[in-house]
Image (tube, rainbow, N blue to C red):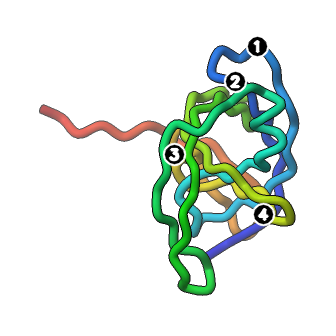
Amino acid sequence: MTVFHVTLEVADPQGASWEPVHALADTGATFTKVPREVLDRLGIAPAATTEARIADGRTIQRQLGEARLRIEGRQVPDIVTFGEPGEEPLLGSHTLEAARLAVDPVNRRLIPVPVFEMPG
C-alpha cells in the first residue's frame, strides 16, 4: 500500500461551492473521507450508512454522501464518507478510478491513466 498527501477540492453535487482538502492518497481506502464539518458547510447531507473496516481491523459505521470532487484538473461526481473530528481525510481508490488517476509510488504523485473497455 502506497500513501502520500494531495490536495483535492470538494463541492456539493451541483458544484456551486468548493473547498480544498489536504488528504492522504490511500490506495487501501475504498471511498474518499472528507471531514464532516467541510461536508456540512457545503450542504452535503448523509444519504446512507455502511459498515467500514478500518486499518486496525475493527468494523465501524460510516455515513455516505454525494459530492463533486476535483483533483489534478479532473472533476467527478463521487461517493464520500463523513470523517469525524481528528480523523485524517483520505483520497480513496473509488475516486482515483473515477478521475482516471493512478498512484505513482516511486515519485509519490498521481498520474493519468486511460479508460479500458472490453469489446463486445
102 vs 75: above or below = below
Comparing marks 1 and 4, which lies closer to the viewer? 1
Which mark sits nearer the N-terminus, 3 or 4? 3
The answer to whether marks 3 and 1 mark residues whose Cβ atoms lie closer than 8 Å is no
Circle 1 SS class: loop
Circle 3 SS class: helix
Q: What label does residue 116 carry, if any?
A: none
Q: Residue at x 77, y 61 (%)?
A: 24
82 vs 105: above or below = above
The answer to whether marks 2 and 3 mark residues whose Cβ atoms lie closer than 8 Å is no
Circle 4 SS class: loop
Where residue 45 appears, as percent x and y from the top left, is: 64, 33
Q: What label does residue 108 carry, if any?
A: 4
Kind of residue at badge 3: Glu
Q: Residue at x 65, y 14 (%)?
A: 14
What's the distance in space between the residues labelled 1 and 4, CA to CA? 31 Å
Q: Which residue is mark 3?
A: 97
The answer to whether marks 1 and 2 mark residues whose Cβ atoms lie closer than 8 Å is yes
Which mark sits nearer the N-terminus, 2 or 3? 2
- Location of the C terminus by quadrant is top left
Q: What label does residue 16 carry, if any?
A: 1
The answer to whether marks 4 and 2 mark residues whose Cβ atoms lie closer than 8 Å is no
Where residue 69 appears, as percent x and y from the top left, is: 68, 33
- For label 3, count other residues whose C-alpha is less than 10 Å away and answer few (under 14), some (14-19) or many (20+): few
Where residue 90 appears, as percent x and y from the top left, is: 72, 57
Which mark sits nearer the N-terminus, 3 or 1? 1
Circle 2 SS class: loop
Q: Residue at x 55, y 70 (%)?
A: 60
Q: Quadrant of residue 44?
A: top right
What's the distance in space between the residues labelled 3 and 4, CA to CA? 17 Å
